[in-house]
Amino acid sequence: MNNASLVEVNRYQFSVQALAEMQNNAFAADNWPLVYILSDTGSRKAYVGETADTITRLGTHLKHSEKQKLSTVHLVSSGRFNKSATLDIESSLIKYMFADGTFKLLNGNLGLSDHSYYQRDELYLKIFREAWDKLRSHGVVRKSIEVIDNSDVFKYSPYKSLSADQQQGLIEIMRALVDPQLKNTVVQGGAGTGKSVLAIFLFKLIHTDVDDLDLREFSDEEMELRELLKEIKERFPKPRMALVVPMGSFRSTLKKAFRNVVNLHPNMVISPSELAQQRYDIVLVDESHRLRKRVNLGSYYGYFDKASKKLDLDPYTCSEVDWVVRQSDKAVFFYDPNQSIKPSDANASDFDNIKALSDTKVMTLVSQFRVRAGRDYVRFVNGLLHLQLGATEKFNSSKYEFLVFDELPDMVREIAQRNASYGLARLVAGYSWEWISQKDKDLYDIEIGEVQLRWNSTNTDWINTKNAENEVGCIHTTQGYDLNYTGVIFGNEIRYDKASGQIVIEKENYHDRNGKQTIKDPDALKKYILNIYQTIMLRGIRGTFVYACDDALRAYLKQHVESYKSNVVAFPEVAVQLTPYVNAVPLYDLQAAAGGFSALQHAEHEKWVAVPENMPVGKDIFACHVVGESMNQIIPNGAVCLFRMNPGGSRNGKIVLVESDNAFDGDSGSHYTVKEYQSFKVQTEDGFENKKIILKPRSSDTSITSIELGANDEDQYRVVGEFLAVIV
């Protein structure tokens, strides 16, 4: 293996003759743990496995009725592999190859949970990325890891590992499916608790042959799950099964996820109205809070009445919840009452009635998977919108960007920058403007000051469509989806009344016609609208930005949420003309540095800042805006500072600007941090080497902690500048 390479990928024909050729591969011949991929471009099928006995394992696969039809094998090997590593890389390859879509996978579900092992993040993540790139060069996969990470097919993969909370939920659901005394299961959970992932995992599991089930027996729970699957197979040998998804856009996304899974088909994902066409053994309902009743249905009234009558139900008293119960032997509802957003949604009482039945099992998911700030953020947003926070209570998290903007142009710009850096950053608004651009593409729907924006140009999978980053989504095009960043515009339909200390809804400014017709109780409309804002504020994985049209509402939000501090600094007029690198240096926007610092250096500079007299100036000097409190004993929050690029000599004890491959600064949420550099060295035969580096804050806030870097982190962190002085 090349010394510069961490992993190698070798291609062979998948045949008995090729097994002899593999004896020349030291890893295969010497029973070294490795990962292999069987594939066939004609059938577009593949299988991923790991083994420490390559020749024997592949010989067994050549006798398998399905796998023997595959024509090619790729061996992924490394001198650094061990059993834990190959299990992990096998798991990652299955997840990413599924989402890549080049092949349909023959694999069953994976082990229920991920397991940590020595150097997993420091070394084996690099090995996986290198292996992936080599597989791309072999034509086994096509898409980049970064593109796949942001794809909905990846996020809603049936090969996802489950949390302990989801594992227990899965087993409880399967117990209910084999219990003859139980008909219905209600799985309750808020936004981001993994209901959709659990529903898809379960659907795939039930359609997997027990012999192909790849649950590594790490725990008693996985042993029980295998036995439960056997019982389900005995009761439903060829299950008639459907995944019901009420929202058309999200339904289209899940159909895509089913397309590349062996034994699954897109037509297994259906709309509620399709329930009337046949009866099912098992029906799973995702986003079941969006099942409908006969209120404000618009053009859907006819379909609703026809389906209800076909099922011998009174359309005026039933809901789609009744359709599910009527058309299934076993029904599983994934439910969140706080995401009911309009009058046509089924009544909470419909679910309360089901939960009260003796043949219903109820369970709750509590873990938070979408939002990096976890359940604390979810609770905070709920308290913020329902005025339940203490007078001085503010949100604080080093893992999540949650900011209120005074100026909408700033938020639009920051969302665009986050989209350039991470992808999947979108603007989303309350339904406070009419959709006039639907009929005239030259018109703007949303005009606030100088900002002109248009609503989403499509209702189907809008988040992933071309030009979505330049449009504004609504609740109907974002519910059920994940974003990296969400820019939420609170419209003119919601305001804050300072006299009463209450949030007030202006019905005339709410333009979702089907969302407000028939509502006579103002509190009912207020509940729906607050649910809408809470739902869209829980879309962002990395952060949520907020702008409120109402000044009083914006002031209320700022009491509890940090205000955005612009990187665009208003400098005083200077008496002399600025001359680049003579009396001025470039001002870099580090939060927008998607391409890394080297890319910033070569970009055209739009912002220049004057350098005070007697301060160094030149092409190795630059300025940037330092945001946060981590160095406030020396550098005030928001100050513009002067730095020397690529400083030589010892850095110990100096303040430096450090770039990271991963966002790690809690103050700015960017790839950069400003800290005091401390190194601890040990003497070796070759001299002194860094054993540990501490990036130390100098702050009055004792909750801000140091960042410790080890020798294995050298490739991930780079000192790009030495602090010289605060200049503004």
Image (spheres, grey):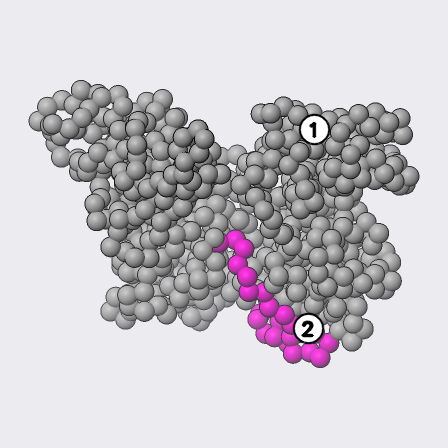
Residue 345 shown in magenta = yes
Residue 166, image x and y in percent?
Answer: 63, 61
> Tag 2's secondary structure?
strand
x, y percentage for residue 431?
Answer: 44, 53
Vertical relation: 538 (above or below) 657: below
Count of marks, rendered view: 2
Q: Nearer the viewer, residue 511 or 65?
A: 65
From the image, state whether disc 2 or disc 1 is nearer to you: 1
Q: Position of residue 226 (x, y in %)?
A: 78, 60
**SS assignment at label 1:** strand
Q: Give the amino acid at mark 1.
A: Val
Residue farthest front in this picture: 685
User: Mark number for residue 361?
Assistant: 2
Q: Using the image, tell me which numbered label, if any, was put on residue 496.
A: none
Decide: is 292 above or below 118: below
**Residue pictured at 53% horizontal, 59% vertical:** 368
Q: Going 27% across and 40% down the picture, which residue do you hit?
A: 653
Q: Is any atom of residue 246 visible in this view?
A: no
Q: Which residues are magenta?
A: 343-371
- Residue 309, image quadrant: bottom right
Between residue 542 and residue 703, name the one nearer to us. Answer: 703
For disc 2, the neighbor class at 10 Å (few under 14, some 14 to 19, many from 20) is many
Crowding at dot 1, Cα within 10 Å, few <14 / some 14-19 / many 20+, comes out as some
Q: Is residue 431 visible?
A: yes
- For the N terminus, the image quarter is top right
Q: Position of residue 690 (x, y in %)?
A: 40, 37
Question: In the rendered view, does 277 fall on the left or right side of 722?
Answer: right
Question: How much space separates mark 2 and mark 1, taking CA atoms?
Answer: 49 Å
Q: What's under tag 2, amino acid-wise?
A: Lys
Tags 2 and 1 in contact by the CB under 8 Å rule? Answer: no
Quadrant containing the C terminus is top left
Residue identified by numbered label 1 = 9
